Structure formats: structure tokens, C-alpha cells
Amino acid sequence: MPVSADLSKYLDKEYESKSLNEILDAPVSALAGVTEDDAELLKRAFRIKTVADLGKNKYFLAANAMLQLTK
């Protein structure tokens, strides 16, 4: 079953019309509010280069899991 979602509020303008796979392969700076400098810091601190890397980072996943447990 196809699923659709409006991700535009989370993305920079140039990525709004991209496929989900293209977004996941995009640099973290494709996310709205994440600057090139922010992306560089994430790369240095956590080796995060893409949106997919951010989504599967063990520290971010652990923090999200703890947050979900409070709900």
C-alpha cells in the first residue's frame, strides 16, 4: 500500500520535491534549519553525513527511545 507524507516543513526548498530515497541520501543540511556548519559538526562528532545517517545514529535513536518511554 503506497504511503504519502508532506515532509516539506522539514526540508530545505530544493529537497521538497525529491523522492524519499533522494532525501535519505542527501546531506544533513537538506533538513530545514540545519546549516552547513551544523552538518560539519555532526560529521566530525558522530560521522553523520546524510539524513539516513542521522536517522540511524545510535545516540539519536537511544535519546528518542527514552523520550518515547515518557509518553
Image (cartoon, helix red, strand yellow):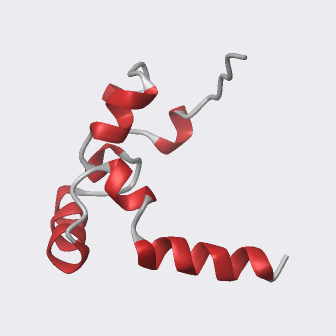
Vertical relation: 57 (above or below) 69 = above
Q: Position of residue 28 (x, y in %)?
A: 29, 52
Q: Position of residue 19 (x, y in %)?
A: 42, 22
Image quarter hosting the N terminus: top right
Image quarter hosting the C terminus: bottom right
The structure residue drawn at horizontal position 52% and vertical position 71%, both measured from the top left corner, is 61
Where residue 21 sits, quadrant-wise, is: top left
- In this view, which residue lies farthest toward the right? 71
Q: From the viewer's side, name the closer residue of 30 and 71.
A: 71
Where residue 4 sits, quadrant-wise, is: top right
The structure residue drawn at horizontal position 68% and vertical position 23%, both measured from the top left corner, is 3
Q: Is residue 59 left or right of residue 40?
A: right
The structure residue drawn at horizontal position 37% and vertical position 34%, both measured from the top left corner, is 23
Q: Please give the count of numbered marks on the rendered protein.
A: 0
Vertical relation: 70 (above or below) 61 = below
Q: Is residue 39 left or right of residue 20?
A: left
Vertical relation: 6 (above or below) 10 = above
Q: Position of residue 33 (x, y in %)?
A: 39, 55
Q: Position of residue 2 (x, y in %)?
A: 67, 16
